[in-house]
Amino acid sequence: MLETNSQKVYVNGQFFSKKEASISVFDRGFLFSDSVYEVSAVIGGDLVDWQEHFARLIRSMDKLNLVNNFQEEDFYKIQKKLIKENELNEGLCYVQVTRGVAERDFNFATNSLSPTVVIFTQEKLILSNPASKKGIKIITVPDDRWRRRDIKTTQLLAQSLAKTYAIQKGVDDSLLVQDGFINECSSSNVFIIKEKNIITPNLSNDILGGITRSSLIKFCKKNNIEIKEQKISVDDMMGAQEVFLTSSTGFVLPVIDIDGRQVGNGLVGDKVKEIQRIYIEQIKSKLS
C-alpha cells in the first residue's frame, strides 16, 4: 500500500492525491448527511460482492430521490484503478454519493443538483484479523438512530457514539436494542445459535440488509444449513450457545462476551468456525 499522502482519491471525475482531494463546504452530504455510501472488501486486489453492493447503492439512492445516472461498470473501473494505483492488496473500497452542492436549505425540491461522488481505498486486515480467531466482546445499548436504517446513508453519528462508548467501556462494539429486541451492531448484522438453530433478525426498516448477511445465508443454504429470520429478544440472545456478527470488512466475527457475560464457554464455537470456513471458501467465486 502506498504511503498515506501518496494515495489517490476519486472526486467527481478526477483523481487527486489524498491531501489535495476536497469537496465544497456547501455540499449537502457535508451539511445534512444527505448522501449514501457503500463499502466493499478488497482481497488480493479484487472486490468482494461488488455487484451486490452497487445494487444496494442504487436502491439507497432511489429511496432518497437522488439523481442516478451511474453505471455499474464505471464505478467498477474507478475502484479497480484506485486499488492498482494505491497498491492495495487487502482492505476496503469506499464509495459515497451525495445529493450535490447548493445553498443551505432543508428543502431540496427546487434544485436540480448534480451528485458528488467520492471514492477511496483503505488498508485493513480482513482474512488475518485476530478478532476472527479469538472473538470479540460487546455491550447492549439503546438504538437511538432514525427509523429508516434500511437505507445506507452517512447519518452515522448514533453508530459512532455507540461504537465509541463501547471502546471507552473496554469492549469492542455496541449492540443496538429496541423495545427489548436486538437490531444490529454499530456496523454489522447479528446471528445467534441457540438449541442448534441459527437465527438472525428479519429484514425491516429497523436494520440494514447487509451484503455479507445475504451472501452468508445463501452460502449456508447451499451447504444444507438453515438460517431462520425472526425477531430476537435480548433474553434469547443471552441464552444462545454461540453469537456472531457479519459485515463487509469483518466477514464473520465471533462474539464471546455480552454485557460481561460469557457466550457459551467463552470461546469461539465450532459452528461459528464452520460458518467462517464456508464463507471464506464461497467468496472466492464472488471476487471481481
Image (cartoon, grey):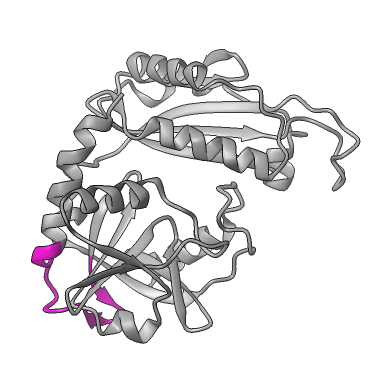
The residue sitting at the left extreme is: 270
Relative to residue 48, is residue 81 drawn left or right? right
Q: Is residue 20 magenta?
A: no
Give the quarter of the image for residue 40. Answer: top left
Vertical relation: 282 (above or below) 120? below
Residue that appears at 22% across and 72% down: 197
Q: Position of residue 117 (x, y in %)?
A: 61, 26
On the image, the x and y values in percent for residue 182 come to 43, 74
Please say if 201 is above or below 91.
below
Residue 257: say if magenta. yes
- Residue found 41% across the figure and 18% down from its top: 82
- Asked if residue 7 can be seen in this view, the reply is yes
The C terminus - image quarter: top left
Residue 42: give x, y in percent of width and height: 31, 31
Residue at (41% x, 76% y) in the render:
140
Which quadrant is home to the N terminus?
top left
Could you tell me how many numbered marks the image carries? 0
Residue stretch rendered in magenta on the structure: 255-271
Whether residue 20 appears in this view of the structure is no
Q: Is residue 7 left or right of residue 219?
A: right
In the visual, does 65 lie left or right of 268? Answer: right
